[in-house]
Structure formats: structure tokens, C-alpha cells
Amino acid sequence: MQRLIALAIEHHRAGRLADAEALYRQVLTSDPQNAEAMRLLGYLAHQAGNTEMAISLLTAAVTLRPDAADGHFYLGNVWRTVGRLDDALACYRRVLVIAPRHAQAHNNLATLLRARGETAEAADHYRAALATRPDFAPAENNLGALALDQGEAAEAEAHFRRALALDPDLYDARRNLPRAVAARGDLAERLTEPVDESDPAARHRRGTLLSIAGRLDQAEAAFAAAASQAPNDVGYLFDWAAEMRHLGRNREALEALGRALALKPDFALAELYRANALRDLGDPAGAMAAVKRAIALAPTLAPAHYNLGAMLQETEDMQAAEACYRRVLALDPGLAAAQRNLGTVLIRSDRLGEAADTLAAAVASDPGLADAHADLGNIHRAWGQAEEADAHYRRAVAADPDNLAAHSSLIFNLFSRPDVAPEVILTEHQRWADRFAPSPGTVEHGNDPDPGRRLRVGYVSRDFRSHSVGFLIEPVLAAHDRATVEVVCYADESVADATTARLRGLAERWRVTTGLTDEAVAAMVGEDAIDILVDLGGHTQGARPRLFAHKPAPIQVTYLGYPGTTGLPTMDYRLTDSVADPPGFEPHCCEELVRLDPCFLCYRPMESAPAVSPPPVTEQGSVTFGTMNDLGKLTPEAIAVWSRILTAVVGSRLLVKARSAGDSTAERLLREAFAGHGIAAERIVIRAFIPDRAEHLATYGTVDIALDTFPYNGTATTCEALWMGVPVVTLAGDRHAGRVGASLLSTVGLADLVAEDAEAYVAIVTALAADHDRLAGLRAGMRGRMAASPLLDVPAFTRRLEAAYRDLWRRWCESRAALVAGP
């Protein structure tokens, strides 16, 4: 057994956790009471972020061997991770009864005492750790942190320098030293002191001062001089490399880091910085290999696990990224950045309840973490809690006024708030533009002003994929008359799929913009000599509103992917129709409205869509209502009205299907919202996201009447429901987002299913629910009705769109001619 345990420990120390775990379990299979294997397996579980297993194993281990100090020590670390600090203190004190010279227990106990304000006892334990192990750099660093807490910046600086002399790899000491130097308050005076240029240590200290003062070029020169004078000092080489990275000189930094690693092959922090330099130089494979080497050298180096998590997150390996962030938090429980990134990964995995808890912990650790507040806003919006989302977005913007994405989310969320008037929505969008996308003034374009020539039209989107925008723009791209229009697509392919591949085949030029700056894409648009640049994203996630602020094309149009104004002074036109934006809606937007009557879009059904089935009510005897819209559109106002309908229609139920509906917290909140109106839980049927589109469409076969959301209507979901024979009832609102349903229903000849207020909405739905013959007739004839309507006449719609483009182009050409002619 001891041979197996020794081999497992060897794997464990080398970071080969899976191999170590297998051997520990092999020992326990043969000897279930082996406390050592149980203890080490518990320690491994803690390292892997499996807290529950770690507690179970370590508790059992200390019960079997109460005299084994390490068992109590590991259990104390777990209690510390989960915030049970009294239990952690008791464990560390127990360790010191068993092993009074346990340096790490002294250090960890001191850290908890420091957090409680018991600084004198904390200092005693840090010193006890150093008395036991004079080379124990973490205790030296922590004494420095304690001194810094007490305002003793000079003493703190001395401790941090001693810690780094003991261990150049100690990340916390490297992070703390500049804080101590800055806290001394005599930076300017110290920079005037003469430096003994023959002493590399003095030059290195001067480099630290210059770096903190922001004089990076001088700091780099000082570090370079120190490294030149003491070429075998890995610490000097490392700081020189770090300063070159700050200056963007990554290739030179790599050379210095290579020299440091040649001197100290186990210098994990240097390997981590190599990874970061390689990542910045566009070598993700090299960066990944380097960060894994850093972890192999130092399995407890939390920043290395954090960086590996970030790299895995970029490659969409969310499961592996999650494991990395949980490992980080096992090593450093209060690291807010890791909590924030873990929250983001959980969001991507549709585990919104867990994400919300994790992000709440992040902002508790760091209230200024704007991105965590923004992510919390996204979660609440996904739950249909627009007001709560608004509060988090505003906290994000307050914490970081330059956070463009958070501010975009804030103004996008306004469309879901019926208490916010359209004029306020416009003002907030213009405020965004004033801050992030001011008009560049007059921009000259060299496009040939021939009103009759072939036009080059560019479409910009992140949603050229299996997304409502991708589905709705696909028939247009396919139907464009190539004799009059050249199609160029600017695609962010960060989430590419089979739909992306189809769309790529419909463009004469396909430009990938993933990872490029707005300035770079603007230059690309200019090089392509685009005549009309069409925005398909507005302020949705991943869109590029600031690209349009550069005015890279003479005519700029927003269309389809955003339910209202962009607020941009450089956005010339917005495409709509007379129902979605009736005459008089012009003050709601800054763009000139171009109405593509009778409808601003067209729809092409999926060729393999399932056949229409009879109304479920004919077999069940009770009506099933349904909504397939995102939960973010299920506002409290809509839920209140739908509850009135469910109450009025005896025996009815509501099917809710959405991507986030599979999250347990989302489901609980949804049921609670309906329960607040007296609707029993069993009347709300919740189904999660179905990736297969045909299977998704088949779900409409279980619905008699689709209820459109308000004040933000569905678009693609309304088209899908109608094609599957399901009538949709909508409430026409006071903004484009709330009138899309009215536009679609009017286009297919079902204007009588458009309500002007909540009372009419309830009346229309309840009357339709009672008229089973009409439901059957609508269902049977819906596809014929749609096929005969302008909504499915893709060629006619595309000709109207091209005619609008041509008219806008002629206007621009005329304006150019007038400008050339002069007064």
C-alpha cells in the first residue's frame, strides 16, 4: 500500500491529478480505512474544486486518525474556502497542538486572525512560521501585508523584498511590493536620491520606483541595467521582462524570460509570463503549452490556473475552464476576477442560478467589478426581471463609466420596460452615442457617384448563424439580384455553425471580423468601397455600433437585428414599415425612417419543417397556450395578463419553452411569478432549449394559441408559430419592439388578432380559445394563407429592399453632385 501511496503522491506533486486520484482510490478499494489515502484524496478533491467530496473524505480521515496533523490542516483549508472561518481556526489550532512547528498552519492561522483584526496574535504566528522555516517566503510576504495594513509601508517593503529574495516565484509578493512602495508616500523624494550605479540591487530598486511612477521607459532601462550587471539573478531578469511586457515589447520579454528559465528551470512565474507574452503575440498553442508547464512546476500557482481557464474559455471549452476557475478559488477563495469568469462560464452553460450566486460573491469581494455587475444584469434580463437588470447595469456603468458593453446592455434593456417612454429610450441611446461614438464630422468617401451602377452592399453581424437574424436575412441574401447588388458580409465568426457555412456561400465577399477592432473593420469597409453598410445588430451583445460611428461608408442603415433607434448620428436610415413604425413615430429615433410596406421583413420556412397537426384541444378537450420567446421577454406585465387568461379559460395551461427555461432558478422564479396571480404550478409546462430546429418546430404541435410577449414582441418565433398553424395574439405597443407582432399579423391578414390594450388582448384570446372550429380552420389554412401573403414573397420583398437601397444611393449621388457644383 505504501508503495502505491508513494507513487500517487509523486503524481500528485507533479500535477497529474487524475493519475494520483486513480491510485488513491485503488488503495481505498483494498483498504477502505486507510486514513492517509483518504486524507490525500480529500486534499486532491479540494484542489479540483470538489468541495463536498473534500469535506466528506477529510472529515472521515481525521475521525480515523485524529493525531494526523495534515488531515486537520487540509480540512481547515476547505473550511476556509467555503467561508466557515471558525471551523478553519479550530482545525489550524488543532494542527498546532499536534505539530507545534507546522509552519503552514501558523501562516494560515495568522491570516485568519489578521482578517478578524487580531493583528498582534497574527504577527506572532507569522513569526513562528519563520522561526520554524526561515526560508518560508509566504510568511514573510504576509508579515509585509500585515505591516501594510497597519500603515508601516517601509517595514512592509522590506518584508516583501525579503520574500522575493527567498522566492522570486512568489506572485503575491511581486503584486504587493509596488503597493508598499507607493504607500510610503515619498516616491518623488526617493526618485531624486542618487543611485549607486555599480550596485545592481540599487538600480533594481530604482526601476521599481520608476515603474510605480509610470515612467515605464526609464524603469525598463533601470531593470535592464540591473539584469546586465547581475546576469544570474533571475528576479532581475523577470522584472525586466515584466516591464518590457508593459511596454508591449513581448518578443524581447520572451528572450529575457528564456534566460531566467535557463538559470532556474522551475521558475513557474516566468513560465506563466511566457504564456502571456505568447498569447499577446498570437500564438495560442504556445501560450497553452507554457501555462501548462507553469502549472506542472507550481500546481498551487493560482494565476496560472486562472490564465489557463481564460484560454480554455476562449476556445469554448467551458467544462475545462470551469474546472480551472474552481481550482483557482480553492487556492484563493476571494479572487473576484476568478469568481467573475466562473460566473460567465456558468452563464454560457445555461446554469444561471449558480452563475448569479458566483457573481454575487464576486461583487461582494470587489464592488467595483463592473463586468460582474453587467453579467448579473444579463442574468436578470434573461429571467424577465428588467428592473433588476437595469439596477445591475447602472452599477456596472457607475463602477466603469467607459464600459461600452455594459452601457449598451443598459439601453437595450429599456425596450423591455413598459414604464420607460420611447422618448426616454431615444435620449438614453443618444447619451450612449455622445460618450462612445461621437460624430466624426464630415467624412469624404471616394465611391463613384454613378446613380445607376451596381451597388456594393455590406452587411455587418455577429449573428450569421443559427439565430433569428441569420434565419431572417438568409432568404434576402439568396434573392439579391447580383446584376444590381454585390453582397459583402462582415462576419464575427466567434460562434460559427452550419448556418454560417450556408450564409458564407451566399456572399460574393465574406470578411471575417472576429478579434478585429472597430477601427480595423472600418478600414476594411473603406478598402472594399462599400456603398451601403447595413447594421444587423444595433446594441445587442457582440454587435459593432462604434464601427458605424467611423462612417466608413457613404450610406449607413440599421435593419432587422435591433428593435429601435441606435442613437448614432452617423446612422442615416432605419428600415421599418408603416405598422411597426406608424407615421408620427419619427421622433422616436434619430435615423430617417424608410418604410418597406407592407412588411419590413420576409420569411422563408424551413424546408423540412414538420407537418401541421390538428389543434391539441380537439384531443385533450382543454386549450394549451404557448410562448417560445426568450424568458427575458416574459415581463411581469405580460405574466399578469396571461394569468388573467389562464384564470378565464378553465382547464387551460401554458407551455413556456426557452433556452434559459432549463435553469432551475429560472423555472422557480417563473412558477413563483404565476403563483403570485393564483396560477397553480401544474398549469405551467416548462421546456428547455431544443437545439434541433425541426424538433423545436414540432413543439408548436402541442400549442393551440401562441401568446406574444409585450412590450417586446417576438419576431422569428411569431413566423414559426404561424407556419406551424398556430395563431398568435399580440398587443400593439408604443415602440417598434412592441409592434412587430402587429406588422407580421397584418401582413398575413390576421389583423383581428392584434390588440390595442390589455383588455382587448384578454378578450381576443379567450374568444379564440372558446371557438374550437375557428382554431381548427386557422390551423388547417395557415400555411396557404402565409404562402399567399407578402411575408413569404421573398423575391418581391427583396426587390422592394433593393429599390429602397437604389433610392438612397441616388439621393447620395445627387447630394455629391450638388456639392461639386457649389452655390
Image (cartoon, rainbow, N blue to C red):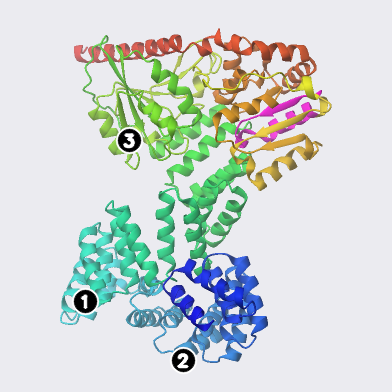
Do the CB atoms of the residues marked 3 and 2 lie less than 8 Å apart? no
Viewer-closest of 348 and 404 = 348
Residue type at tag 2: Thr
- Indicate which label's residue lies in the foreground, 2 or 1: 2
Image height of 448 relative to 231, above or below: above
Residue 561 visible in the snapshot: no
> What residue would you read off at disc 1?
203
Q: Is residue 256 left or right of residue 490?
A: left
Q: Between marks 3 and 2, how big is the CA–CA gap?
A: 59 Å
Q: On the rendered image, what quadrant is the C terminus found in?
A: top left
Quadrant location of residue 246?
bottom left
Do the CB atoms of the residues marked 1 and 3 lie less than 8 Å apart? no
Callout 3: SS = strand
Q: Between marks 1 and 3, how big is the CA–CA gap?
A: 47 Å
> What residue would you read off at disc 3?
512
Q: Between marks 2 and 1, how big is the CA–CA gap?
A: 33 Å
Decide whether residue 645 is among the magenta residues: yes
Q: Residues within 10 Å of mark 1 (few under 14, many from 20)?
A: many
Callout 1: SS = helix
Segment colored magenta: 621-646
**Number of marks in the rendered image:** 3
How far across and how far down the image is residue 144, in percent? 43, 80
Viewer-closest of 13 and 105 = 13
Mark 2 vs mark 1: which is more N-terminal? 2
Residue drawn at x 39%, y 20% is 477
Quadrant location of residue 141?
bottom left
